């Protein structure tokens, strides 16, 4: 016969359940605490391998630089409707407009830039910047990798980087 231990185990089941509840509550409290958003100084948007002319993108970058994001989007929509021209340099026909020597209506490029600017606006909001005080501080277009065509020619591809910063009233006056 097997002898059974006649000693009773202390009733720790209720205390262990309470301890488990406390541990779970502490974990829940940690989950409820949201991480603090760090306010960044700049927001970026990048257009990779865009199938548009680098020359057109360079002139659009010059056109939208130092403007507010929403203002740049509305002006590019006017370009699509052929109500506003983008200033170009070189032997290009003259266009109407104050201070306009010559210009064009790069419609396809403007559509792609509107998409990039919408992404930049979203990044500005996520980074905790004030949209009313934010301007496009840097706009750059350069060659992306250009795949080979038949006969040795190359496709056109452009890489665009837009950067937005918050400007205070003092910085605007200077």
Image (spheres, rainbow, N blue to C red):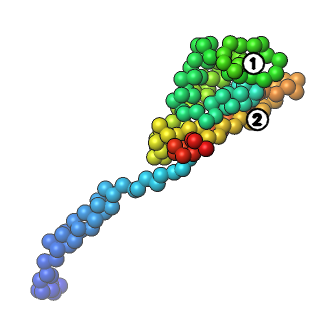
Q: In the image, what residue occupies the spot 43% across and 53% down?
A: 37
Q: Foreground: 78 or 2?
A: 78
* Mark pair 2, 1: CA separation: 27 Å
- First reached walking from the N terminus: tag 2 or tag 1: 1
Element type at mark 1:
loop
Which quadrant of the rendered structure holds the N terminus? bottom left
**Residue 139: x and y, percent?**
66, 37
- Residue 22 found in image quarter: bottom left
**Residue 48: x and y, percent?**
66, 36
Left or right: residue 68 compared with residue 159: left
Q: Is residue 86 above or below residue 122?
A: above
Left or right: residue 104 compared with residue 121: right
> Mark 2 or mark 1: which is in front?
1
Q: In the image, what residue occupies the spot 66% across and 23% down?
A: 109
- Residue 57 found in image quarter: top right
Element type at mark 2:
strand
CB contact under 8 Å: marks 2 and 1: no
Q: Is residue 7 visible?
A: yes
Q: Foreground: 68 or 51?
A: 68
From the image, tell me which residue sits under label 1: 101
Q: In the image, what residue occupies the spot 71% across and 35% down?
A: 141
Left or right: residue 14 compared with residue 41: left
From the image, tell me which residue sits under label 2: 143
Q: Is residue 161 above or below residue 109?
A: below
Q: Residues within 10 Å of mark 1 (few under 14, many from 20)?
A: some
Residue furthest toward the right? 151
């Amino acid at each position: 016969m097997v002898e059974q231990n006649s000693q009773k185990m202390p009733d720790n089941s209720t205390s262990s359940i309470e301890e488990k509840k406390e541990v779970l509550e502490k974990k829940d409290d940690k989950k409820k605490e949201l991480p603090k958003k760090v306010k960044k100084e700049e927001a970026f948007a990048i257009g990779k391998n865009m199938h548009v002319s680098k020359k057109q993108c360079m002139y659009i970058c010059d056109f939208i630089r130092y403007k507010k994001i929403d203002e740049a989007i509305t002006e590019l929509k006017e370009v699509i409707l052929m109500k506003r021209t983008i200033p170009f340099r070189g032997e290009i026909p003259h266009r109407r407009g104050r201070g306009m020597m010559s210009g064009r209506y790069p419609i396809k490029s403007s559509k792609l830039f509107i998409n990039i600017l919408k992404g930049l606006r979203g990044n500005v909001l996520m980074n905790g910047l004030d949209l009313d005080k934010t301007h496009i501080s840097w706009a750059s277009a350069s060659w992306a990798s250009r795949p080979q065509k038949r006969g040795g020619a190359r496709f056109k591809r452009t890489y665009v980087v837009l950067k937005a910063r918050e400007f205070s009233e003092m910085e605007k006056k200077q």
